[in-house]
Amino acid sequence: MDLSFFTKKFRKPRKIALSEKNNSILTIEHIYIVLAGLIYAINGYVYFDQKLIGKYIFVLNIVLASLFFAVAVLSSFLKFFKKNLTYVVYTSSYMIMIQSVLESYMYQHDVNHIIGLLIVYMVCSMGFKSNVTLNIFLVVNFIGVSSSTFFVQNPNLSSEVIILAFFTGGVVSMVSIGSRL
């Protein structure tokens, strides 16, 4: 029986639980940061192994993955990192989108990259905690994707189709995730 409920002398112990409460060690933000690190490490390795990226981009991916892992671990012990973990999640979402847009642009927005980019766009929008930050993320990345289509001429897919797909994806994310917030 936990007696800390009846007395204020005892401080409630920190638990490992999937929660956003201040007394838990493992939060949604931790999971997101670890997953971002895994994605950077795995994608960097696979792309480098397939000779799709150079050595410098590979090193950059590994450094970013290491930084995300370090932040996830440090935020479990240090208040500064735990307090700013949400901003790290936001920053990682923007970084993942920038890299994804650039990769899709490099491959002239072929259908496979557009589908992957649309999935990344919608998944990265899940880490936001307020409607304002979510909407800013969706609008900024919609503008980035839309503007990148004007510099690439894909004979199989028109710019209007790509823009419409991202507009629809943004609206779906805004409504479904925004209503949860």
Image (cartoon, rainbow, N blue to C red):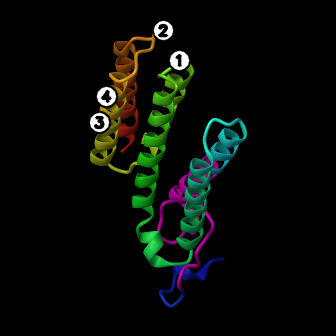
Query: Distance between the Cα atoms at labels 4 and 2?
Result: 18 Å
The answer to whether the residue labelled 1 contacts the one labelled 2, judged by CB atoms less than 8 Å apart, is yes
* Category of crowding for the residue at label 4, using alpha-carbon neighbours closer than 10 angstroms: few (below 14), some (14–19), many (at least 20): few
Q: Which numbered disc flags the more N-terminal residue, 1 or 2? A: 1
Residue picked out by circle 4: 147
Q: Is residue 153 above or below residue 145?
A: above
- Which residue is at the front of the view, 57 or 2? 57
- Circles 4, 2 touching at the beta carbon (< 8 Å): no
Q: Look at the numbered disc 1 and give the secondary structure of its residue.
A: helix
Q: Which residue is mark 3?
A: 139
**Which mark is first along the chain, 3 or 2?**
3
Residue 15, x across and y down, in percent:
61, 70
Q: Which mark is residue 149?
A: none
Q: Which residue is mark 2?
A: 156
Q: Secondary structure at mark 4?
A: helix
Q: What range of the chain is rendered magenta? A: 11-40
Q: Which residue is mark 1?
A: 111
Tag 2: amino acid: Asn
Give the crowd class for mark 2: few <14, some 14-19, many >=20 residues within 10 Å: few
Does 35 lie within the magenta span?
A: yes
Give the spatial CA distance, label 3 vs label 1.
22 Å
Q: Quadrant of residue 162?
A: top left
> Which element type, helix, strand or loop, lies under badge 3?
helix
The quadrant of the rendering that contains the C terminus is: top left
